[in-house]
Image (cartoon, rainbow, N blue to C red):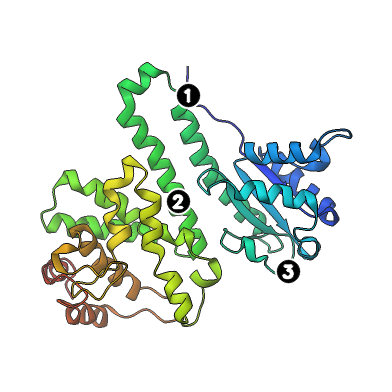
Amino acid sequence: MSTTAKRPLKVFLCHAHADRDAVHALYARLTKDGVDAWLDKEKLLPGQDWELEIKKAVREADVVAVCLSKQFNQAGFRQKEVKWALDTAMEKTEREIFIIPARLEECETLESLRKWHWVDLFEDDGFEKLMLALDIRAQTVNASLNFEKKSANEIVQNSNLQLAIAYDATIQGWVQSLEWREGKNGHTSRLVDLTLRLARAMGVSEEKLEDIRIGALLHDLGYMGIPEAILNKPGVFNEDEWKIMRSHPQYAYDMLMPITYLRAAVDIPYCHHENWDGTGYPRGLKDVAIPVAARIFSVVDVYDSLTNNKPYRKSWDEEKTVKYIQEQSGKKFDPDVVAAFLKLIPL
């Protein structure tokens, strides 16, 4: 008998009264696709304590989908049902409950919701993007659920394996979510492959390579704390925006350190923006004070970034990129890492 535990993802649909018909259509599509959706029109009955029922449903949800429209913006938090739902959702951490603002039409963004992951349902592929986001969340929820359902004896016998499976599912979900949010499909897999090749070439032990693999996968994890309007800005950041962007390594550290299984992988997400000459961030570490995994990854990250197109610039050719990396040896990069990298990536 299979021990895999699965259940439908629980999604609370938060919306203004005026949007009820449009949201009911969304509810029908989600339900058809196997989602356990909660909609007041379907769930609340006359005579119930609506505040109690709404708060209970939000606390039991895996995701709160905030259905935004001009009507929602006009209602804001003045509509009591909306306020009950969002106040309850925001009491919980993002690890416990995801919030997905799902715009039903082009409308203004509520300030309190700008940090969350957007889905524009009025676009042609909006529903598909919503289902992708929900699928990523479901992977994490069901991996955790499966682990929790194991018997005490199975957990003792298979704890390391089960942790690896559960956390790997979570990691892959995070990576997919970040790549989808940043529009960087394939970016992470390229980085992981080249980072591991360079680490092996530098004699890093096989035991340490798994931590480097996970760290490379999660190198952009801190971007989950950066507002999307800043993260995907096509132009140059102003001073305040740079300050926010440079906080992402600290966000990654704060997310990973409480998780024992992932703690050893924190060096790359936390330190890959440190520079060999001490001019990097967040802590201004210098030369060998920077963890070796971060020193290796930083060269690979810059190489991949420069040789691929960005919203604000065209990709560089191989020769120009390699020349830049050589120039930054002893400044931005560890000279030993640069030397090993140049042997790995010949012109």
Horizontal and vertical percent position of residue 313: 42, 82
Residue 292, quarter of the rendered image: bottom left
Confirm or deny contact between disc 3 and disc 2 (CB under 8 A): no
> What amino acid type should be assigned to the residue bearing mark 2?
Trp
- Asked if 195 appears above or below 41 in the picture, the reply is below
- For residue 246, the mark is none
Q: Which residue is mark 2?
A: 174
Residue at figure coordinates x 26%, y 67% from the top left:
298
Confirm or deny contact between disc 1 and disc 3 (CB under 8 A): no
Residue at figure coordinates x 36%, y 62% from the top left:
249
Nearer to the camera, 39 or 35: 39
Dot 2: within a 10 Å radius of its alpha carbon, few (fewer than 14), some, or many (20 or more) residues?
Answer: many
In this orientation, does residue 220 appear? no
- For residue 149, the mark is 1
**Separation (CA) of disc 2 from disc 1:** 23 Å
Dot 3: within a 10 Å radius of its alpha carbon, few (fewer than 14), some, or many (20 or more) residues?
Answer: few
In this orientation, does residue 274 appear? yes
Nearer to the camera, 52 or 30: 52
> What amino acid type should be assigned to the residue bearing mark 1?
Lys
Horizontal and vertical percent position of residue 199: 18, 57
Please state if 85 lies on the left or on the right of 204 as rendered.
Answer: right
- Return the residue found at the far right: 46
Label 3 secondary element: loop
**Separation (CA) of disc 1 from disc 3:** 43 Å
Please state if 56 lies on the left or on the right of 162 as rendered.
Answer: right
Horizontal and vertical percent position of residue 58: 67, 41
- For residue 107, the mark is 3
> What amino acid type should be assigned to the residue bearing mark 3?
Cys
Residue 9, quarter of the rendered image: top right
Residue at figure coordinates x 57%, y 58% from the top left:
117
Label 1 secondary element: helix
